[in-house]
Amino acid sequence: MAEKLAPPSPTQELADAGREFYRRGWTLGTSGNFSILLARKPLRICVTASGIDKGTLDETNFLELDDDAEILQGFGKPSAETLIHLTIYRFLPRARSILHTHSVWGTILSDAFFERGAIEIEGYEMLKGLAGVQTHEHKEVVPIVENSQDYIALAHVIENVMRDASGLHGIYLRRHGLYTWGETAAEARRHVEIFEFLFEVLGRQLK
Amino acid sequence: MAEKLAPPSPTQELADAGREFYRRGWTLGTSGNFSILLARKPLRICVTASGIDKGTLDETNFLELDDDAEILQGFGKPSAETLIHLTIYRFLPRARSILHTHSVWGTILSDAFFERGAIEIEGYEMLKGLAGVQTHEHKEVVPIVENSQDYIALAHVIENVMRDASGLHGIYLRRHGLYTWGETAAEARRHVEIFEFLFEVLGRQLK
Amino acid sequence: MAEKLAPPSPTQELADAGREFYRRGWTLGTSGNFSILLARKPLRICVTASGIDKGTLDETNFLELDDDAEILQGFGKPSAETLIHLTIYRFLPRARSILHTHSVWGTILSDAFFERGAIEIEGYEMLKGLAGVQTHEHKEVVPIVENSQDYIALAHVIENVMRDASGLHGIYLRRHGLYTWGETAAEARRHVEIFEFLFEVLGRQLK
Amino acid sequence: MAEKLAPPSPTQELADAGREFYRRGWTLGTSGNFSILLARKPLRICVTASGIDKGTLDETNFLELDDDAEILQGFGKPSAETLIHLTIYRFLPRARSILHTHSVWGTILSDAFFERGAIEIEGYEMLKGLAGVQTHEHKEVVPIVENSQDYIALAHVIENVMRDASGLHGIYLRRHGLYTWGETAAEARRHVEIFEFLFEVLGRQLK
């Protein structure tokens, strides 16, 4: 059998994921942003620069930022949504990579389930792809947060949502997109794929 | 981190976009045409030759034309729709690249919304992918124009539509396709992706 | 601008088309078959061997056959549907390449429109991708023929359908697949893409 | 015409199939598992290791196991569902490769048809892609089994289902995924493609 090459770096993993998500239509029109945690104290992350085409994403499209979203390394400007990444890293010790995507089915569900406050998914084997879930009988709750251009306020809302609900794997900004995370870039990517699969399953059954 | 190569030429960018649009099913059957502005006075553009398979589009498939759609360089014949490109360039000083695509969801919406006169899209984060749009609360209006084989008349109708409505990012020919544009080839491509994403979101929610 | 290489052979063009159709889901599970006309008198064609995976189709997967479907060259056995190809070539002097594909939307439409006898498509710009069609106001009629495993009988039915209706670009076998053709491999491929686009447009609007 | 290279090994064929299934969205989020039979007495199989990304599946991702699911060769741990593979190999002498996939349409159908006990598919030409099926008039029955995390119990249920119904080509675990098999890796792959095509045809027509 063939030998495996050295494993890719985390930013390479995110670049691979981003190009694949683009292909699937989850990061069209330069939408979406991806990050990894480099250090927790003081907080230091790598995040995609703003306005990058995800179909050709590569390692040069990442910025290294500190806790105040100041650029330590790299070219371009950070997305306004970097604040949300920083908030999630601060709040969730388990999160070491955060992915934000925009899909058609997610967008539709975030509207259809907005009144209920969350997309609830229960009874599907694919739920076991979410870290720590052992059975399809699990009920996954993805809180839906009203979209806003005030990212500071939005970050506070997201912090409160995470405070009220433990065990979350993702949060949906209404008519905007998914935030999900993982202990590794690979886990965060798997969470995107699992959620998108399940969003499509639910979305196609909406009456 | 790896070094980036020299940036692609505008026709190379359009060729890349065209092959990607083909993959997504937005330029099947040799449909669609793409152009860039070379000079404004006198008007000189580069546009895809007629009848070209967009799945293998490359730089040799472009023609250089003057203001009267006369060929200055390149092989093949210009699309009859070149007139519409020229009209948009004349009317919109901001436009430096124009893309025309045919998608399933756009076709369906252009029929479903025809009586209302426009596809109206409001409240989606992805709207921020359109140049100058700062908030998801923006309402984007995409006027729908009845399709015609009389391209001179059609060009006049489109000119009138652009005169009546400022701030447009695109126009839809009923049961035919989208015209959108940008200050660069990349911006025009982003607009196609944003519109197609939003058309699918709306289309999947039609009752 | 870059130089174009020598044009591909017709079987290479069909192999390219086949791999693309597979990617789009129109020739899954080794379904579909493709042919080109080599000579008309006596009739000699090249056709895909039976049971070939279209995702990796190449020039070695074609058989050269005579008028009686006897193999003149190549490895494998001809599809039982070769008879239908031969019938169409005999009847339509214009046809020099025939493509047969199986798509989800086509299958659904062939059932939904079976009672009416044909899939009728009218008013779409994409119709102009069919050879000789000059306006979107054209009404394209795709007769639907009941499926059968008796290919001799089926070939006769198809011959009668072609006799009764001139100007056809394709015929649909109910719950089975599309036959379309062209004067070149490229034209036949374009017809598949045009029909599949329009089938999806109609299929998504079925109540 | 070009010469064909030596045929791929069965694990290479499964790796190719897995990457293709991933592309189509049938093995997202590391879901799915694939095996081939190496020897029947004593039973020895090759099966994908647990938690592998199917988008980059290669031959090194397979484990060689004995009848007790003990690892004879390879890195990683076997999926808990290996038991189901072993059960099917023991019961069906014809099966020499088993594929398990998770698709959106299959998931939806397995719920919609659960009360009826099976997904029944009849009258489609594509059914002829299932080994031994000679006509579109065939009725294919895909029993639906309630999902469970008790794989020993599940394997017993599957054994009973296979005992009660001869001539099956696949079994569906409710809201989980498809098990299908073949005499070769290529036949098993063809069965996945045929079933998924037909699931989509049925799924899109659900009221």
Image (tube, coloured by chain):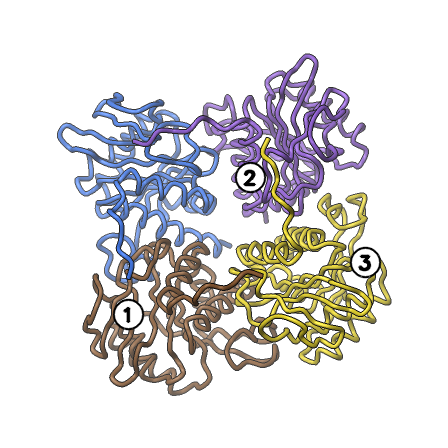
Chain colours: A blue, B purple, C yellow, D brown
Name the residue tied to disc 2. Answer: B196
Pick the residue in front: B8 or A165.
B8
Mark 3 neighbour class, 10 Å CA radius: few under 14, some 14 to 19, many 20 or more: few
Q: Chain of mark 3?
A: C
Image coordinates for residue A129, horizontal then vertical, percent:
29, 56
The dot on residue C94 is: 3
Pick the residue in front: B150 or D128.
D128
Residue drawn 55% across the image and 31% down it: B12
Q: Nearer the viewer, mark 3 or mark 2?
A: 3
Q: Quadrant of residue B178?
A: top right
Name the residue tied to disc 1. Answer: D81
Q: Chain of mark 2?
A: B
Q: Chain of mark 1?
A: D
Q: Nearer the viewer, mark 1 or mark 3?
A: 3
Q: Quadrant of residue B191?
A: top right
Same chain letter for marks 3 and 2: no
Image coordinates for residue D195, horizontal then vertical, percent:
49, 69
Can residue C115 be seen in this snapshot?
yes
**Quadrant position of the N terminus of chain A in the picture:** bottom left
Give the CA distance from mark 1 to mark 3. Answer: 55 Å
Which residue type does callout 2 highlight? Glu
Residue drawn 63% across the image and 21% down it: B37
Would you say B190 lies left or right of D178 here? Answer: right
Give the CA distance from mark 2 to mark 1. Answer: 40 Å
Which residue type does callout 3 highlight? Arg
